[in-house]
Amino acid sequence: AQSVTQPDIHITVSEGASLELRCNYSYGATPYLFWYVQSPGQGLQLLLKYFSGDTLVQGIKGFEAEFKRSQSSFNLRKPSVHWSDAAEYFCAVGGPQAAGNKLTFGGGTRVLVKP
Amino acid sequence: DAMVIQNPRYQVTQFGKPVTLSCSQTLNHNVMYWYQQKSSQAPKLLFHYYDKDFNNEADTPDNFQSRRPNTSFCFLDIRSPGLGDAAMYLCATSSGTGFGEQYFGPGTRLTVT
């Protein structure tokens, strides 16, 4: 069965500092990996996705993520955090065998940004 | 812009009083999903439609029903809301033919009094 683990429930980072959010997945075939961001009271917005090819993918809002098959990880990074990046971040996995394009979500990481 | 729209954004209902939440999409996607999200938790899939085919998750209570009258619209019906059904309800869509990315609406916050 597929699963996603986000080990950090909360992360606090100073504005301007770098950010890295961890994501580990378990999937029996080629994974399709996603990062979503959710601001308070809002829906989820797709930040970036990985299907194949270059293992470093660029997304919106200055985010990037690196796929490491050997570590079953897909960590999200941003070099310099802005106050508006305070939100909840969800990693998700799907794949060609996922009927109906269903995704499995991690538990989320809440990011707090200090001035 | 193509998008997923949910109405209303906030809904208050009484314990046991049926309520319907609405979702529409301009993406012309084949798949529409309904998720329940409680505070500080990941979204929990309730069910999804692939075109007209309804797919219920095994642990979705019978109290939750859905209708998809056409490609653009999908409704979530809660027949007898309990206090435990207070949550954010998210609608999402997916093309069904691509790599599975889902596009979410802004959600409806349901309060049960």
Image (cartoon, rainbow, N blue to C red):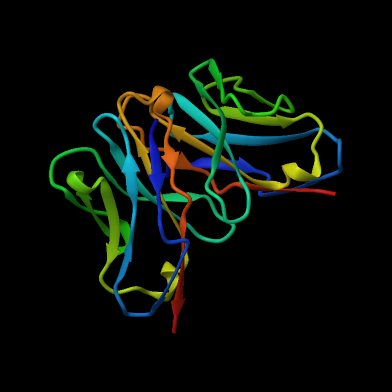
Figure quadrant of residue A18: bottom left
Q: What residue is shown at x 36% (from left), y 39% (from top)?
A: A93
Q: How many marks?
A: 0
Q: Is residue A63 visible?
A: no
Outermost residue, top direction? Answer: B53
Q: Quadrant of the N terminus of chain A?
A: top left
Outermost residue, bottom direction? Answer: A115
Between B74 and B36, which is closer to the camera in this rendering?
B36
Between B58 and B98, which is closer to the camera in this rendering?
B58
Q: Quadrant of the C terminus of chain A?
A: bottom left
Between B96 and A10, which is closer to the camera in this rendering?
A10
Whether residue A82 sits left or right of residue B78 in the image: it is left
Q: What residue is shown at x 31% (from left), y 42% (from top)?
A: A33
Figure quadrant of residue A76: bottom left
Q: Is residue A50 above or below residue B79?
A: below
Q: What residue is shown at x 31% (from left), y 78% (from top)?
A: A17
Task: List x then y, in percent, for residue A16.
Answer: 32, 80
